[in-house]
Amino acid sequence: MKVAQKQLERHLARELAHVYLIAGDEPLLIDEALEQVRAAARRKGFDSREVYTTDRFFRWAELEGEADNLSLFASRKILELRLPSQRPGTEGGHALEKWAERKDPDRVVIITVPEKLDFGAKRPAWADAIEQHGVFVEIWPVSRTDLPGWIQQRAAAAKVKLTGAAAQLIADRTEGHLLAANQEIQRLALEHAGRRAVNESGELDEADVLASVANNSRFDVYKLADAVLGGESGRAFKILAGLREEGTAPQLVNWALVRDIELLASVDYAVRHGDDVEAALGRNRVWRSRQGLVRQAVRKFPTRRLRALLMQAADVDAVLKGVVPAEPWTTLTGLVLAMLRPAAQA
């Protein structure tokens, strides 16, 4: 069956399937759905957990051996398979289909894919098998229109009341990135926790959010992205060092950099095919506050350079997912260096 994320809790209260597929391009929502299934499995006595990342060195035969290596006294296990994409190869696809069909009372299998699955005939057969024999949890992105409401609901759950304008400000600031928006909400909840006694029923408005941002000395990934696009190398590396020191997830830093590389590539493609820059910026939903910065950057990043940066960003992503062994922050620094390099040297 297919279950929407908002219906997942109700489904898990009724039953626990033997296999789940959680797929979508919102990492925060994928992680939360994964934790919901994990928690339900633990409540049913699945107290052991094994995690596999199916990179190019992964041996599917070993996983099959794990499935067949059952013992009378073995503990009930949660097996998590983290696929980097929806294409695990022929061997992997066949193995996943077998897992979908195998109903083992001592195993709950949870498969995650960090992208939306293809529809119709293009969708992989193994995904159809899981939907037929288990549960497919499809993660849908929060639309730009719905984001302020989503932020208000999240804030309310964290015991923070936001006005509509305050929620819109956070939406604008985070530009649709749910993980960053959630971090802002959690930070506001911590900062205002001690003030509820003064104004128990009050809402935080735009001024409160702006004051919180102004008082927040931490460097953020958006400032880094702007510094890199603007060619401010000294400021960019200072921010990057601050992000690392504060324990910011390198995946979030990489998201901000890749987002801008892909944006510039999209604008460049549109201009090369007849659009003017203004139309391309509008079609790519560039926020008004960044249009000047992006407009200048488009001139500094020709097509050849953007292609090279996209390839380098893919290498960084492989490191961050554990597919390639390397130090994450070193690879991120290399990407920042490549983006800051003067056009003549690129």
Image (cartoon, helix red, strand yellow):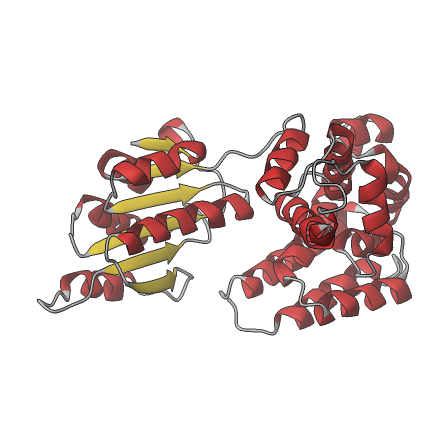
Question: Which residue is at 73% across, 50% downward?
Answer: 192
Which of 37/284 is in front?
Answer: 37
Based on the displayed image, in which of its 4 quarters is residue 243 positioned?
A: bottom right
Q: Vertically, is 137 above or below 87?
A: above
Residue 37 lies left or right of residue 68; in this view the side is: right
Based on the displayed image, in which of its 4 quarters is residue 14 positioned?
A: top left
Question: Which residue is at 28% across, 40% downward?
Answer: 130
Residue 344: x %, y % from top left? 89, 59
Residue 118 lies left or right of residue 259; in this view the side is: left
Which of 329/279 is in front?
Answer: 329
Residue 44 lies left or right of residue 212; in this view the side is: left
Looking at the rendered structure, the number of numbered marks drawn on it comes to 0
Q: Vertically, is 204 above or below 81?
A: above
Quarter that holds the N terminus: top left
Residue with the most extreme front position: 197
Q: Is residue 258 visible?
A: no
Q: Vertically, is 159 above or below 152?
A: below
Quarter that holds the C terminus: bottom right
Which of 57/63 is in front?
Answer: 63
Question: Which residue is at 87% across, 49% downward?
Answer: 300
Residue 233: x %, y % from top left? 88, 64
Question: Which residue is at 22% across, 55% downward?
Answer: 107
